[in-house]
Image (cartoon, helix red, strand yellow):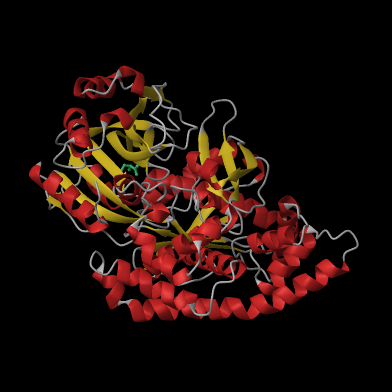
Amino acid sequence: MKITAQQLRTKYQEFFKSKGHTIIPSASLVPENDPSALFVNSGMFPLVPYLLGQEHPGGARLANVQKCIRTGDIEEVGDNTHLTFFEMLGNWSLGDYFKEDAIKWSFEFLTSKEWLNLPVERLAITCFGGDSDAPRDDESAKIWMSLGVPQHRISFLPKEKNWWIAGNSGPCGPDTEMHYWIDDGSPAPKTYDVDEPRWVEIWNDVFMQYEKKADGSLVPLEKQNVDTGMGLDRVLAILNGQKSVYDTELFKGMWEVLALDQEILSNDEIRKARIVLDHIRAAVFMAGDGVEPSNKDRGYVLRRVLRRALVMGRLLNLKHHWLDALIGQVAATYASAYPDLVARSENIFAVILAEQKRFEATLEKGLKQFEARIQNTESGMLTGKDAFDLYQTYGFPWELTHELAAQAGSTIEKSEFESEFKKHQELSRTASSGQFKGGLASHSDKIVRLHTATHLMNAALRKVLGEEVWQKGSNITEERTRFDFTHNKKMTPEEIAEVELLVNTWIARDLKVKKEILSLEEARKLNAIGVFGEKYSDTVSVYTISDNKTGEIISREFCGGPHVERTGIIGTFKIQKEEASSAGVRRIKACIV
Ligand code: SER
């Protein structure tokens, strides 16, 4: 079936309208009042309050096409299926229908002649295999079989694969995924294989039965919900017989702008070109929703994708002004589906081109420096320190130096670069004057103890006031810790006393404080909270305060440290003041006596 992106969006919406769903608009990519992720990463994300029980004005059956950003798979972008920005087609039941209807409708939409008409012979299904939290999902498997999916095409997989949660906590549950065999040259194998890239996941039906609390416990939800998500780009490619999402009409105009002959490009060049297309498309959508490049949070993600695209563009020798043309092309491609992009295009151009200017000025100088360094080494090998100097002085991202070195037949150890980075961080902390900027300015004993006390206070506030409490900022001096957090009313004297008591109890229990370096993904899985620190890489340090005897986790935060090794040496914790800081944000000053 040949189909355009707009036809697919419309078909999906019509189908679910015919099943009694209200079509709701896509939310902004920037989450509203939800600090648990930097970007909306799925159709369900803006719907979390409703999945937790709040009534939705559109009723109990909803469907939409939602803009999403996912950076977790950024290393895979450029293969046939991974993207940073994508649109997700989704339908939801808020306490209304459950497994039976959700699966029946997914099957009907995918396979019926009237809708997508995909052959059942090319479908494979995965279901949740069960663990100590929840049982194996035999019910879903039975429904699939009743619709005509053969048993051998249904596999049961563990939580890492067939369970969905948007962030660290919130509504979640088992899911059942639909995979499509994309190879036209050979028939689909009898069974699904998770490591086989020709099986492409196209749709995911999640059965949200639980709420995961910050302490990791699962609590059954009062109402059972359905949350489904289907990747528009992937399905579009499949329906049009294309091997890769980068071959669809959504990227066609953009390829033309790059003016590269795909026939003669190497695989590596194709990957680079795809990264350019993906990252610029994502950057245009981010800027369209008001994100500006900066060194933290969302702004950092935008800066990172833009700079990476610029680097790739340079390595591909793209012609002059390719970026301007590409921005215009993204807006044109999406003009009818997202008219705001066109309306805001002046601003989008300004934001992206200003970042290009900033980056390119240093890029030139840095390239000269790179040449000079590589000429000067006897071995022809650059060190981690060289890479760090280039980063430090010229803003060279690791990828660029790595890539340039590879082209020159040299290699650099990433771990060396990272350890230089860490050394530098420590030094700048010690040198700066008593300020707490995402790291400690001084490692005095008192500050270290207050730092760990601040983590305990954060955990206690979330326990006493609820998990909506989120750190907004913190500053520690020898005398006190100052902590800003989201909360919209004054704390009562009882609440203050309760927080103090909790922190002092944890101190008295002499809990162990452990530091681990984890990948962002692992840290997320462990429900670490807090402000991201070392954003230059995908690894983060996480501090966990726990009771070894009971296994209870009291606090787990992203943090550069340092901290005390056991809470027993902190001293007695005292809240001195609780006051408003700004709208919806409270400020506590506390000390150790
Ligand atoms: N939330 C699920 C996903 O993103 C289904 O929408 O896969």
Residue 542 at x, y percent in the picture: 59, 46
Residue 116: tell me if it is visible: yes
Asked if residue 30 shows in the view, the reply is no
The residue sitting at 41% across, 79% down in the picture is: 349
Residue at the image point whose x is 27% and y is 70% from the top: 335
Tell me residue 315's x, y (percent). Answer: 62, 67
Q: Is residue 281 above or below residue 128?
A: below
Q: Give the number of callouts.
A: 0
Left or right side of 393 for 125: left
Q: Is residue 334 left or right of residue 399?
A: left
Residue 439 in the figure: left or right of residue 336 = right
Residue drawn at the location 67% of the way across and 46% of the way down:
564
Quarter occupied by residue 519: top right
Quadrant in which ligand 1 is drawn: top left
Task: Name the residue at 49% across, 79% down.
Answer: 321
User: Vertical placement of 236 versus 400: above or below?
Assistant: above
Residue located farthest toward the right when viewing the structure as drawn? 378
Image quadrant in which you'd find residue 215: top left
Q: Quadrant of residue 278?
A: bottom left
Percent coordinates x, y for residue 136 in the rendering:
35, 20
Foreground of the two, 394 or 505: 394
The picture places residue 7, in percent across and down from the top left corner, at 20, 55
